[in-house]
Amino acid sequence: MDSHSPFALVIAGQPTLRRRLRLSSFAALDQRIGLRYHLDGLDLGETAGYVKHHLGLAGRSDPLFSDDAVSLIHQTSRGMPRAVNNLAIAALVAAYAGNKAIVDESSARSAVAEVTSE
């Protein structure tokens, strides 16, 4: 039984998991992790492509977000897809509430204020 390790475990999580594993109470577990990999957030081009792709899945082929709005969403979300989603949806709602045909930077700023106020 001691000649091999019959158990392998993959631990995946948000960036907070990495910080939590570094706490002294998890030292034994942290020492046993053999491989670590970290995925960075999307860059600005990838964020723009990500938003465009999701709009395409929803049936929208023409641009709905201005470049400034996408840039602000990217900057605020640090390219993390879930945060991009949340900000984009809030920006869409803000643009709709403002009776705008396109999500502009002011709609994105309203979304940032709404999402980050908590």
Image (cartoon, helix red, strand yellow):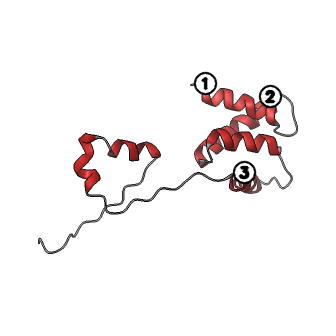
Residue shown at the point (46%, 46%) measured from the top left = 15
Q: Could you tell me how far apart the alpha carbons at marks 2 and 3 are, in whole angstroms?
A: 20 Å
Residue shown at the point (59%, 45%) measured from the top left = 82
Kind of element beneath mark 2: helix
Mark 1 or mark 2: name the one nearer the start of the chain.
2
The percent position of residue 117, horizontal first and vertical second, equals 61, 24
Mark 2 or mark 3: name the one nearer the start of the chain.
3
Q: In the image, is residue 45 above or below residue 92?
A: below
Q: Is residue 37 visible?
A: yes
CA neighbours of label 3 inside 10 A, class few (<14), some (14 to 19), many (20+): some
Q: Quadrant of the N terminus?
A: bottom left
Amino acid type indicated by mark 3: Val
CA neighbours of label 2 inside 10 A, class few (<14), some (14 to 19), many (20+): few
Amino acid type indicated by mark 2: Ala
Residue 96 lies in what quarter of the image?
A: top right
* 7 vs 31, nearest the viewer: 31
Kind of element beneath mark 1: loop
CA neighbours of label 1 inside 10 A, class few (<14), some (14 to 19), many (20+): few
Residue located farthest toward the bottom when viewing the structure as drawn: 3
The answer to whether 49 appears left or right of 31 in the picture is right
Residue shown at the point (33%, 45%) measured from the top left = 22
> Label 2, on which residue?
97
Count numbered badges in the picture: 3
Residue 92 lies in what quarter of the image?
A: top right
Q: Quadrant of the C terminus?
A: top right
Q: Could you tell me how far apart the alpha carbons at marks 1 and 3 are, in whole angstroms?
A: 23 Å
> Label 3, on which residue?
51
> Label 1, on which residue?
117
The percent position of residue 48, horizontal first and vertical second, equals 74, 52
